[in-house]
Amino acid sequence: DGGITQSPKYLFRKEGQNVTLSCEQNLNHDAMYWYRQDPGQGLRLIYYSQIVNDFQKGDIAEGYSVSREKKESFPLTVTSAQKNPTAFYLCASNGPGTRGKGGELFFGEGSRLTVL
Amino acid sequence: KQEVTQIPAALSVPEGENLVLNCSFTDSAIYNLQWFRQDPGKGLTSLLLIQSSQREQTSGRLNASLDKSSGRSTLYIAASQPGDSATYLCAPRGGTTDSWGKLQFGAGTQVVVTP
């Protein structure tokens, strides 16, 4: 089945450690996104990539880094510079949006990161 | 920057009642608007996608309307069932060069349908 796979589902990190969240899609989508969700808040965009080897900062990119070396993969690294990393992280992708159709966004199941 | 508001924040109804969920947004220059459902601890599931040129979109018991000029979308769920209990989020997608591809999410409406 086509879809988006995020791993791990749960992750615990000690303060000062970097962690990498995996996101893989087999939908042949060009655009991929990382969102962060905190309790009672809407999703906030961290980084997005519209094509391989290119990515842009979203609204809350500080303390995070990404790479896009393959179309299928868009890993997110949460660095020690991120002051409040405990959150639910969601990866998404969408196909091309032509006028009048397309552009539907699909999400993975999420990764919950807890800093101990 | 696009601001998205969803009212009410929470809603509890008995099974069989119709649900009406509201979404308002400040920037009407959108490409499309998507409604999602999120179950606790899970990712988002796409329910409906409305293009900016459309007035409404239907899928089964779900109907979403879009009034782009007034910055409003409404999700109607007919004959609610306990399985409809979830948080519903709306997300307009930017239609200008600067905002292209970015969805701005509302905080969601938490729905509980009691048997």
Image: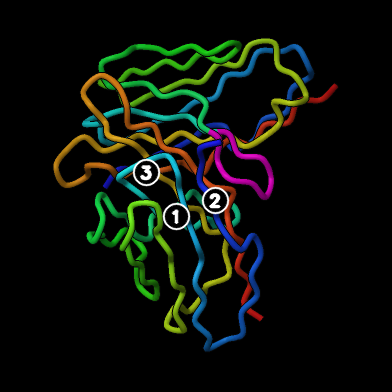
Q: Amino acid at mark 2?
A: Thr
Whole-percent x, y for residue A105 in the image: 41, 37
Q: Quick check: B115 above or below A108?
A: above
Residue at 47% over, 20% down:
B74
Please identify, in this view, whether the residue under mark 2 or under mark 1 is nearer the observer. Answer: 2
Instruction: Kindly report the distance in space between the C-alpha atoms of the residues bearing marks 2 and 3.
Output: 23 Å
Mark 1 = which residue?
A: A35
Mark 2 = which residue?
A: A5
Whole-percent x, y for residue A8 in the image: 61, 63
Mark 3 = which residue?
A: B104
Q: Of marks 2 and 1, which one's residue comes earlier in the chain?
A: 2
Q: Is residue A75 left or right of residue A68?
A: right
Residue at 16% over, 47% down:
B98
Q: Do pointers 2 and 3 mark residues of a single chain? A: no
Element type at mark 2: strand
Is A81 magenta? The answer is no
Instruction: Kindly report the distance in space between the C-alpha atoms of the residues bearing marks 2 and 1.
Output: 15 Å
- Report the magenta residues as a range: B37-45
